[in-house]
Amino acid sequence: MSNERIVVIGGGLAAATAVTELREHGFAGSITVLAGEAHAPYERPPLSKEVLLGEAEPESAAVHDLEWYAEHDVDLHLGTLAERIDREAREVHAGGEVFGYDRLLIATGARARSFDLADDSGAPVSYLRTVDDSIALREAFTPGLRLGVIGGGWIGLEAAAAARGSDVEVTVLESLAAPLLRVLGPEVAQVFVDLHKAHGVKIVTDAEISSIKRAGDVVEVRLADGSSHEFDRLVVGVGVLPNAELAEAAGLSVDNGIRTDSRLRTSDPLVFAAGDVANVDHPVLGEPLRVEHWDTSIKHGKVAAANLAGGDVQADALPYFFTDQYDFGMEYVGHAGADDRVLLRGDVQGRVFTAWWLRDDRVVAGMHANDWDAIEQVRRIVGHRVDAAQLGDASVGLDDVALRD
């Protein structure tokens, strides 16, 4: 396969992992990476954690230094946005050049969803998606700054925690009845509410923003209930959108991201998609799933590399994500829905516990909070049918919970 040409569009973790796997497993053909940012491919979790906290430098997020790409004969083009895919000619047009391919991987990731009321207000507004975003926001965190965080998802809450570490005054404006409500359900979401309140964060729920105005250095956010809040700066964390426009223009199937089969193959058998942009037929969960997390990007990168090189590997790993906020850490495995039943065991008030989401008697997701020894049992149990009474009985060790299938 020394004459095979693989082109990778994207400069994130899925792209870098795929390239690494290809070279480490002996792929001898040409590899070209078209990375839209000026930075070498990097991981995103540190941007809202160690880098934003000032505990690590931005360079620490890089998957490899630039020398690695040269040493492994990877043609890395930084600051090069792909403009067009010509599937008939098997070419990618980018930066005034044309790159031919035999197989193509699209790993274009996702972008922060904009919030027009904030963007159009003239207020200082930050998003947190890129390494440059993280650097700029870290520099803005000064003691006494009044920060308004619009959106109580993972990014919003991690930004709030980092800001409190710099003695910033933080208010989170969440449109739902609790932050993370759709992801975790009310019982576990309340744990995060209590955590942030204990660290001095003000959380405003059911917050429907009607206007944002800047008057001098003051930013006024007015809510539909007539209340108003004054800030010096805003952080917007209202989700992301998959960067699927390039694929759609090329005629590939797109629906909440680039649609792929379980092997990350798109509607064109020579084109694969991975990472945040890929909406994958999950062979275990039995439904299409697009996951915006670090672990999935790594797993997708490995599967994509195997199949780009002619293999036949499924992307069957269960979704996994983690967060660290203040002295609280958690890991979550699986994929639960809003209607799934939640079962808690352990010391919820002390924030050392496990949580389980059940659909009938099948565990569809599980997490631990500050119980690091539990993660292997979480991985073992999720996806299986169990006796819910046994799972909820703290006197029964997790390793003794019987799996029914």
Image: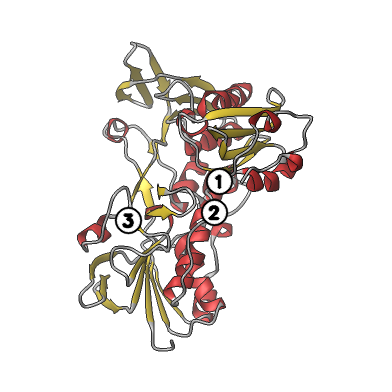
Q: How busy is the neighbourhood of tag 2: few (under 14 within 10 Å), some, or many (20 plus)?
A: some
Q: Is residue 329 visible?
A: no
Residue under circle 1?
321
Quadrant of the rendered image containing residue 86: bottom left
Q: Tell me which numbered mark, 1 or 3, is placed earlier along the sequence.
A: 3
The image shows residue 393 at horizontal and vertical percentages of 73, 28
Q: How busy is the neighbourhood of tag 3: few (under 14 within 10 Å), some, or many (20 plus)?
A: many
Answer with left or right where residue 355 lies relative to residue 255.
Answer: right
Q: Residue shown at 38%/24% (left/top)?
A: 218
Residue placed most toward the observer, 52 or 379: 379
Residue under circle 2?
295
Answer with left or right where residue 48 lies relative to residue 218.
Answer: right
Residue placed most toward the observer, 95 or 293: 293
Q: In the rendered structure, which amino acid carries the disc numbered 2?
A: Asp
**Up/down of 363 relative to 172, above or below:** below
**Up/down of 345 relative to 222, above or below:** below
Q: Farthest residue in the bottom direction?
A: 2
- Contact, CB < 8 Å: mark 1 with mark 3? no
Q: Quadrant of the N terminus?
A: bottom left
Q: Tell me which numbered mark, 2 or 1, is placed earlier along the sequence.
A: 2
Question: What is the C-alpha distance between the residues marked 3 and 2?
Answer: 19 Å
SS type, badge 1: strand
The image shows residue 334 at horizontal and vertical percentages of 54, 44
Q: How busy is the neighbourhood of tag 1: few (under 14 within 10 Å), some, or many (20 plus)?
A: some
Q: In the rendered structure, which amino acid carries the disc numbered 1?
A: Phe
Q: In the rendered structure, which amino acid carries the disc numbered 3?
A: Ile
Residue under circle 3?
258
The image shows residue 91 at horizontal and vertical percentages of 25, 75
- Contact, CB < 8 Å: mark 2 with mark 1? yes
Q: Tell me which numbered mark, 3 or 2, is placed earlier along the sequence.
A: 3
